[in-house]
Image (cartoon, rainbow, N blue to C red):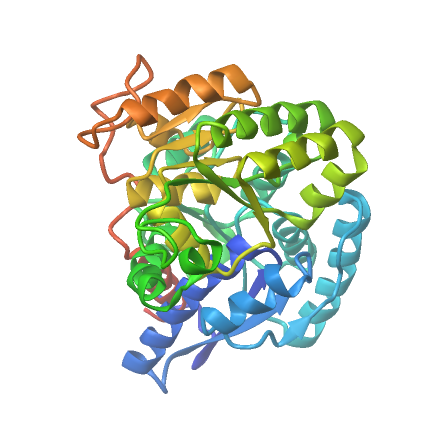
Amino acid sequence: MESMAVGETAKILTIVGARPQFIKAAAVSRAFEKWNAANGPSRTFHDILVHTGQHYDDNMSRVFFEELHIPEPAYHLGVGSDTHGRQTAKMLAAIEEVLEIERPHLVLVYGDTNSTLAGALAAVKRHIPVAHVEAGLRSFNRRMPEEINRIVADELSQILFCPTVTAVDNLRQEGIEGEGSGTAVSCDIFSGRWVVLSGDVMADSLLYNGQLAEQRSQILERLGVGPKTVTEASRRYVLVTVHRAENADAPHRMEQILEALRAVAERGFAVVFPMHPRTLKNVHACTSCAHLLARCRKAGLIVCEPLSYLDMIRLERNALAILTDSGGVQKEAFLLGVPCLTLRDETEWVETVQLGWNVLVGADPMALVRRFEQVLAWNGVGAPFAGPEVSPSVDPQPYGDGRAAEIIVGFLADLFFT
C-alpha cells in the first residue's frame, strides 16, 4: 500500500472542548507519544491540540489538563457558553483561522458536542479530512443536540472509529460502510472511507487511571462518605450527575429527579451530587426546584462543585449506585461493576442495559425508587438488573480491552506512513 506521502511528519489537529473529550484525547495523545518514541524521528505524528473553550470553568477544564498530564493546548479559542447556534458559529470562525495557519493533514474530533460539530464542519469546508472518535453512537432521539452533532459528524467524516459493534451496525444501517476490513487501502484519503471497530478510548482511560485514583484522590475523606472515610467506618452513598438539556433545562423533570433523590436520602443514604454549573443555575432559577434542593440537603444530599477525573473515578468505584444522564458515566459505571440508573428515556450505550448493569428510569421518581430497591436487594453476584431487555448473547466486554487508542493511532500510521 502506498503512503499518503505526507513527508516525515503527519500533522493532526485535535479539537476538544468538554471534559469527556479531554479524557478521550489524553488516551490518544499517550498513544501518539508511544508511537513516536518507537518509530521516530523519520516518521512522527505532530498532534496539535485546540481547546474551543466550550467548558471554561477551571473545575470543568484546567484541572483535567493538569491531572491527566495533557500538554497545554496550542490554541485556546475561549468561546465560552452561548446558545447552540451562536456557540457553534463562534467555534467555526475560530477553528477556520487555526486551519489556515496550521494546514493539518487530518482533523480529529471526539464524541458529540458542539466542538465536535464545529471541528468537522470547518475541516470539510477547507477540504481537510476528518476522523471521528466515538462514531456510530445513536440514541434515536433527534431532540437531543448531541444526537444531531454525532449524526452530522459521522456523515462528514472519512474515518469513523467506532467503540462498539452496535455503533458499526448503526452506521451500516445508515449506508455508511468502510472499504475492506478496516485497513487503509488508498493513498488519497478522500477517495476512501473507513469504518474501524477500535474499542472505546474511555475504557483505556479508566484502566490507565483507575489505580491512580485510589492512590491519589481524597474525595471520600473530604466528603465523609464511603468505605475509607476517617469519620465513619462505612457510610454508603449514591452518586448523581445531571447535565443534559432534557433534564437540566426542564424544571418539571428536575423537580421529579430531586423528589427521587430526597426519597433515597431519607432512606439513610448519603447522596453525592457534583453539580454542573448550568444545572445549579437552573435549579436556583426555579422556585420549586430550589425549595426541593433545600429539602434534599436536609435529608442528606451533598452538593459539591464538578470534580476532577480522579475524584470522579474514586467516587464511582465506591458508590452503592450511580444515577446519571451522562453517557460516559453510564459506561464507567459498567466498567467498574457499579449499578447504574440512567435518568433518560434512551441511551446510546445499549450494551450496558443489555448486560443488566444499567436501567433507564427517565425522571420518574417511582421508577427510580423501585429500581433502587433492586440494587439494595442485589447480592453482588451477576448483574443487578434482570428483565427482558437483558441479553446473554451480548459480548460481555463490548468496549474493548483497553487498546482503543493504540488501534486508532496504528490505523492512522498505516494510512499515512505504510
Q: Determine the residue positioned at 59% across, 27% down.
A: 257
Q: Is residue 279 above or below residue 386?
A: below
Furthest residue in direction bottom, as rendered: 41
292 or 131: nearer the viewer:
292
6 or 327: nearer the viewer:
327
- Is residue 12 visible in the rendered image? The answer is no
Left/right of residue 128 with respect to residue 25 in the rendered view: right
Q: Is residue 336 above or below residue 204?
A: above
Q: Quadrant of the C terminus?
A: bottom left
Q: Position of residue 50 (x, y in %)?
A: 62, 68
Q: Determine the residue positioned at 38% across, 76% down.
A: 33
Left/right of residue 93 with respect to residue 268 in the rendered view: right
208 or 16: nearer the viewer:
208
Furthest residue in direction top, as rendered: 388
Q: Position of residue 42 (x, y in %)?
A: 36, 85
Q: Is residue 12 above or below residue 184?
A: below
Q: Residue 357 appears in which quarter of the rendering?
A: top left
Left/right of residue 98 with respect to residue 72 in the rendered view: right
Q: Determine the residue positioned at 33% across, 27% down.
A: 375
173 or 391: nearer the viewer:
391
Figure disc tally: 0
Q: Is residue 327 above or below residue 61?
A: above
- Is residue 106 visible in the rendered image? The answer is yes
Q: Quadrant of the N terminus?
A: bottom left
Q: Position of residue 94 (x, y in %)?
A: 75, 64
